[in-house]
Amino acid sequence: MRRAASDIATGTLFGIALNYQGLLHSRLDEFNQPPYQKPPQKPVLFIKTPNTRSVDGQAVIAPTGERLQPGPALGVVIGKTASRVAEQDALAHVAGYVIVNEFSLPEDSYYRPSVKAKCRDGFCALSGEVIPTGEVPDVHGLVLTLLVNGEVRQENTTANFVRSIPRLIAELSEFMTLHAGDVLITGTPEGRVDVVPGDEVVVEISGLGRLTNPIVAE
């Protein structure tokens, strides 16, 4: 049964950086330089704070003098407590999926995502319904599309994840408990674009529907 995201996806919003193969590979030269010397070996996490929550149809404010970039993403809604979950058991802890638009200012460092870039008011829009796992037979074969004013600006597929959803849940629950209502934002693909006031931004995910947010001036 489908449920409103406002009723079930009420917990912490956990973002996962660098979870698309194309994005990770595009940054390998940078990661092999000092001070890092190698790509990240574990998921790179950040949190979208409660003030970032937005909904379908809600306007997103473009900060004056800044570049605003939408980020199409699949959100995984945790359905029951997950602590030290084995990868093969992980999907049993998922209630369903939502469409997410993870807005951000451009990133200076993927290793240290900036609170100021990630956590502006309204910078995390969630679609209205949680689509149950039973309605999504192949969650690792979904097409994500970003449209700006009706024009396709990004397209990718969850088949290109660096880490699958079960692996993400297993690795995260090794060191922190995930609770019912928490949302894992499974990453945005390479090729982020800029949007400006007056634009209409739409994220579509095959089988899940669409999420629409107009951009307005500050």
Image: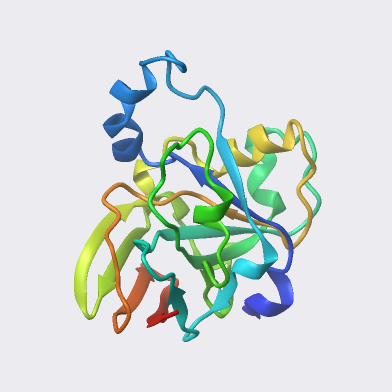
Q: Which quadrant would residue 122 be assigned to in this image?
A: bottom right
**Image side of residue 182 versus residue 191, left or right:** right
Q: Is residue 35 left or right of residue 15?
A: left
Q: Residue at x 68, y 68 (%)?
A: 9
Taking the image as shown, residue 131 lies to the left or right of residue 65, namely: right
Provide residue 175's location: percent of width, then percent of height.
76, 32
* Residue name at image x 50 percent, y 33 percent: 111
Q: In the image as oriented, which residue stretches furthest toward the left?
A: 151
Where does the image place residue 81, in percent across and percent down from the top left? 81, 51
- Above or below, 83 against 9 in this view is above
Left or right relative to 48: residue 41: left
Which x, y percent locates residue 120? 55, 64
Q: Residue at x 56, y 27 (%)?
A: 42
Q: Describe the colour scheme in one phrase.
A: rainbow
Q: In the rendered image, which quarter contains the N terminus?
A: bottom right
Q: Nearer the viewer, residue 48 or 138?
A: 48
Residue 123 sits above or below residue 114 on the image:
below
Residue farthest toward the front in the current orientation of the protein: 65
Q: Nearer the viewer, residue 107 or 24?
A: 107
User: Residue at position x 27%, y 33% from top?
Assistant: 26
Image spot of residue 205 (x, y percent): 38, 67
Question: With respect to residue 100, does 43 lie above or below?
Answer: above
- Report the front residue among 106 and 22: 106
Q: Quadrant of the C terminus?
A: bottom left
Relative to 91, is 11 above or below? below
